[in-house]
Amino acid sequence: MAKIIINGKIIVVKNGITILEAAKEAGIEIPHFCYHPCLSISGNCRICAVEIKGRQEPVISCKEIVSDGMNISTDSELIQKHRQSVLEFILINHPLDCPVCDKAGECKLQNYYFDYSLKQSRFKEQKVNKPKMLKVGQHIIMDAERCIECSRCIRFCKEITKTNELSFEERSDRTRISIFPGNELNNQYSLCTVDLCPVGALTSIDFRFKKRVWFLKTDSSICNGCATGCNIYVDHHDNIIYRWRPRENNAVNKTWMCDYGSLFYKNLNPDKRILSPLLKSDNTFFKTNWDDAFSKINIILKSVDPKNIGLVLSAQATKEENEAFYKFFHEQIKSNNIFITGKKNDPNFKDDILRDSDMNPNTNSVIKLSDKKIDTSSDISVWFVLGELLQEEITAVKKSGSTIILITPFYDINNNYADIVLPQTTHLEQDGTFINKNGIEQSFNQIITPPHNSLSGVKIAEMIRGRFPT
Amino acid sequence: MFCGGYIISPPLPSTQGRGNYDVEGVINMQKIVSKNFSIKDCHLIKVALQNNAYRSLDKLFSMDPQKVIEEVKNSGLRGRGGAGFPTGKKWEFLPKENKKPVYLVINADESEPGTFKDRSIIEKDPHLIIEGAIIAAYAIGAHKAYVYFRGEYVRQMENLLSALNEARTEGFIGNNIKKSDFDLTFHIYRGAGAYICGEETALLNSVEGFKGYPRIKPPFPAVSGLFDSPTIVNNVETIANLPFIINNGADAFARIGTKISKGTKLISVCGHVAKPGVYEVIMGMPVAKFLAELTDGTIQERAIKAVVPGGTSVPVLTAAEALRSSISYESFEETQSMLGSGGMIVIDSNTCMVQVLADIAKFYHHESCGQCVPCREGTGWIKKICDRIEQGKGSEDDIDLLIDLAKNLKGKTICVFADALAAPVISFVIKFKDEFKKHVALGRCPFKN
């Protein structure tokens, strides 16, 4: 342990950590652009410099390791002046186009200028011009003028994805972030560079110009794109989701998430959803209300022998939803016909970074309830299905002309296999829990209001149960 | 601009008539590095061997490597590339417990404006460098020596390559050099023309195939340098001093020069002197004497206005300051400048100092690697302000701004490149403020009609 003094306060920290990390522990924020906890140290932005007693010049805190007795000041006059000079230098060739820049409002440069400088620029010369509006990848637009050359994105592509698409070109103030000729920034994690970018040099084509960030409300949740369960921030406004961003969790996803995950929120939008219960009559679906739907289910349940009723739990649904239906079946219907389903595994999706071949967020939870896959041998005539069935499962359950009651947020009505469809909420519209591929249990809260009539699986199970004759 | 017209054929000092001077009772004349410069075809091994090349090796291999380091340390030899760090001390920084290979890197990226001394050694006496490299490699336990040339030194590189080939044929390179059990191979690299690759860690990055960005220190190259292994980077002239030390002993070297600055220094002098070129002088020689006797004064005997003593990265001296200094580390330190690389630029009274600073700033703006914020942005800004003042469009505020910006550059970056611009800016503006003010007041350059 090392005993150090930061801003007059004595703190004891672990040996071998940097001043920046030690200050963070002490609750002191040191501004930084190029430093990132999951990337190598570049030391180029110079704004994290602090004053160490006995040293003449400021020392960069992202690299300097603490040593016993170190007397550090993060806000001395020398440091205040140094930060102002760094910000002044960065801003001389920066286009200052905040009014049309997507990053405004969450831009480190903008924030630090307001926090640490607010000085009038003394620059009277012509700014250096660099390429703008370059589409460097499927998801990314680059603006080299806004870039502050912190090299975070370069280091990300070098150290994390190991794809090395980006590099610096030229020298001096002509230095610009650039992509190798013939290459595109199309790795599976390219949108992380947008999150890493402290300024608006790399922006997401998906999010550009959709919303000013200060309107967005940010909540925490979990990505349900695959079994990894990356921690995310959900940015939303007026019940509409605008983007997902990775949230730091060193046990799961560090600070990254894949592009598939980042854009997965689009699948949860109401335009792809069924918004009220559907009943099939004469091979056509009719919209109905919950009362009618539940009455119809009640009639069906009464008319069959419990041993002919089956339940399919889903690795897509939350732990609570699966448990609610499991409990209803186990305790009231007293049936053991409980199966599980989920999206098909995709071995091509898996990589060494985060992505897993299991495309379901909750497999490790649902297999605790049942490990039976749907089999064709049983004589089940009524099926409760959470989530959607795979094509071969549809043929298996549909063969005997049985009744299928589907509880799902998404249903293509042209896909005519269900008899009753109940609109379920997505995981963003309810409280719940997923257990990820490594067995880590991650809970999340309701973030947005469910569209129209959707109900969570827990609620639906409760309603059916309430009407079930005991 | 400083030396463009002069360096094509630097005249060599003859042994007669010049260089006979007294420095506080030490030897009058001594040539260590340039001893063979006036010998025709000394780059050929046949001629070099007749002139005692590789003579030190027998003695070297009879010595313990630690003894060699000791000897170099006792000689008081300091790095001749610019920083002036004691060579033996640098070698001692190598980790004692080390399982990785040790590399010797010879820095021939001589890019400091006004400096062309290493070039003379490589052209005229390449075998001295090879001999010195064998000594350094033996001392530090390196079996691979890298020579890093600046991009423009094509002929010089070819010269060393042919010398290396000859030396290999004679058994001075390769396995079991001169029947000892010491092996050494050479690897030659040529940069792509970036000044910053003369900075030792940027040089290492360049050799490794990366962009020439200086690395954050520590770790210093002696601990973790080329390919993450302990590495010693020495300047060509430093290496060229080693054979003398081994041949004659540390004491013989330490007897030359002043109390602090030992040995001799190659001075490449250019600018408005009558006879620009490369001269070897004993440390401690007065600048006045040097200019009067060796360079034959200035062109048309014009008055000297300023002298840049050691490459453009060091603070400029006014004529008065320069003429009371002598060529040594401590004397230039006294006048708040540096001996640097020994690239002396003499500026006469007809020269506009604002224009000179603008040209220096142009160089640093062009050559900044662009890694750290202050240097990347500040060098260009300073250049633009200097240009504006020179064009008569500056204001009084701009003059103060220059100093403030230079202070914001100094000591704020990974390497000392930013300091290398800050030093001339601060010294030019403070020492020649009147000229800057005159530009502002007149609205034009007073030296132009």
Image: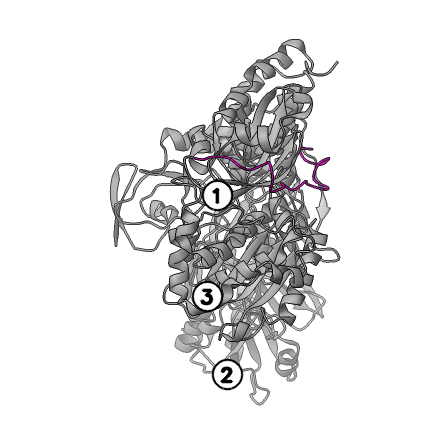
What amino acid type should be assigned to the residue bearing mark 3? Lys
The magenta stretch spans residue A432? no
- For the point 48% across and 52% down, the residue is A41
Location of mark 3 (residue): B59
Image depth: mark 3 or mark 1 in front: 3
User: Looking at the figure, which quarter contains the C terminus of chain A?
Assistant: bottom left
Circle 3: element type: helix
Magenta: predominant secondary structure element? loop
Q: Does dot 1 land on a helix, a strand or a loop?
A: loop
Relative height, residue B115 to residue A392 (above, below): above
Q: Residue at x 61, y 74 (%)?
A: A346
Q: Chain of mark 2?
A: A
In space, the residues marked 2 and 3 are separated at their CA atoms by: 85 Å
Q: Nearer the viewer, residue B120 or B209?
A: B120
Q: Is residue B8 left or right of residue B373?
A: right
Label at residue B241 = none
- Residue A266 position, x and y percent, is 62, 55
Mark 1 surroundings: few (<14), some (14-19) or many (≥20) residues within 10 A: few
Q: Residues within 10 Å of mark 2 (few under 14, many from 20)?
A: some
- Whether residue B18 appears in this view of the structure is yes
**What's the amino acid at mark 1?**
Ala
Give the magenta-colored segment's residue range. B1-23
Query: What residue is shown with label 2?
Result: A372
Image location of residue B58, percent across then percent down: 49, 68
